Image (cartoon, rainbow, N blue to C red):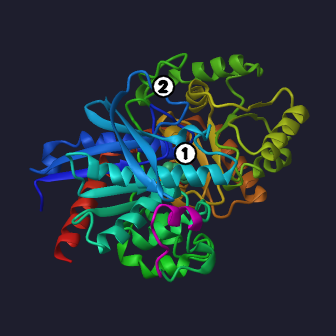
Amino acid sequence: MPENLNVLFLAAEAEPFIKVGGLGDVAGALPRSLHDLPPEVTSGTALDIRLVLPLHPAVKAESLRPLMIFPLSYRGGDLHVQILETSLGGMTVYFISGEPITSSGSVYSIDSELDAEKYTFFSLAALELTRQLDWKPNIVHANDWHTALACYALLIKRWEGEFPGVASVLTIHNLPFMGPDLSALIEGYGLSIAQTGLPEWARARPLPLGLWAADSLVAVSPTYARELLTPEFGCGLEDYIHARKESLNGILNGIDVESFNPAVDPALAVNYGSVTLDKRPLNKTALQVRLGLPQDANVPLLGVVSRMDQQKGIDLIPKALTKLKDLQWQFVILGTGDPKLEELFRILQTEFPDRVRAEFKYDAGLARQIYAGADIFLMPSRYEPCGLSQMMAMRYGCVPIVSAVGGLKDTIYDGETGFVIQKPTAARLATAIKKALAIYSDHARWESIQKAGMAQDFSWENSARQYFQLYQRVVAQLVTH
Ligand code: GLC
């Protein structure tokens, strides 16, 4: 076992530099938690984890130090890779810039060609970076399709005798997003498409190539790891993933429990904790005021904070609430995404103008006010690799109603910390909301569910320990092979 364990962690986005979705939360928090693991856990191993991100145009570059420039061969010429560097709580963070990154505006473009060029360049430049630095990683840790190609290129080059002793880990946050076909680009960078046994449609797409090549695979919850082996969630690759079952792990994400803490969160009208839960309703009133909803402490307020995506099952909510129109409730949804889904909530707000508010934006402060002010959190996802907002909601005493998939299944105990529906349908959601509303009127019982949720430990340290142990196993296996 090496005394130094060096890890280069690759992601498309990471807080606090740039965040679009859950990947940004994870890539912001997990490397830092690994960096901060106490010596009792790492017992003698010096874990040096470094994060590498694309220098998206939206990242504030003023505080970054230029580090180096090197060429990457592409179609008989050279592309220039520029590396900038900064530090985040003592952890080194590299940013990669270059024409394919600067020319594509957003983190994820609607033009898949632009994304293909950007992330192929980024993945291969990140791998090359490890050769240019004095620092050598033992592990390259990629996340999702955007960086999965680094695992593929690493394996191919390892076969050619390069990058000796460097292993790869690929975390799967969302299998259906496999990335575009990269055949032409890959060849442009001097790589070939290997005989992988992948189905024809998948053979040159980055996530499948990463599934084939990575030394170890991680799904972001134990249930999602099992689901990936089934036709329902395996997206046509279930048999393929099955063949790699020995290398597949499930490690649940955490949340930043220091930042997401109702006792100190500056975004809230009033801070509170488990023993001062009686102060919580003041946040509900403040939220009702902010949203222009009637101020009533007794009417149950249902909340959603979500990307507006089919995955999230939020299209079931208007149908469920319409069924329950004779009951007392208020509802707020915050998020952006699919215009068709946004339209459903615009219609719902028109139908129930004094009960429904739909806010189509990204607003981190309002999200926290919803966790603190709403009574019930709805998350009827069709699939959910891990899900973070149900954990945030519980931490704030907002009781979740979720479907029995992926990380939702792993984080919520039905009837104890929340309510779980077996299938995401409008009818089942309506039944669960009705049940929750009935329990809500029993104050003592409701409070015990809130407190049980608030007492759950969703801190990152637990996940970071598991990743650390995984890194050790992966390095040991590579040495013995
Ligand atoms: C993706 C998944 C979500 C997961 C997040 C972070 O956004 O959809 O379930 O929590 O990645 O892993």
**Residue 250 seen:** no
Report which residue position mark 1 lands on: 100
Please indicate whether residue 51 sits to the left or right of residue 98 in the image: left
Report which residue position mark 2 lands on: 60
| Residue 157, percent from left and from top | 34, 68
Pick whichever, 172 or 306, lies toward us: 172
Q: Which residues are magenta?
A: 183-195
Please indicate whether residue 311 sits to the left or right of residue 149 in the image: right
Pick whichever, 112 or 356, lies toward us: 112
The Cα atoms of the two marked residues, 2 and 1, are separated by: 18 Å
Corner quadrant of residue 294: top right
Corner quadrant of residue 201: bottom right
**Circle nearer the N terminus (2, 1):** 2
Mark sitting on residue 209 = none
Residue at 50% over, 39% down:
392
Would the CB of label 1 be found within 8 Å of ligand 1?
Answer: no
Magenta stretch containing residue 184, yes or no?
yes
Under circle 1, the secondary element is helix
Residue at 57% over, 32% down:
371
Q: Amino acid at mark 1?
A: Pro
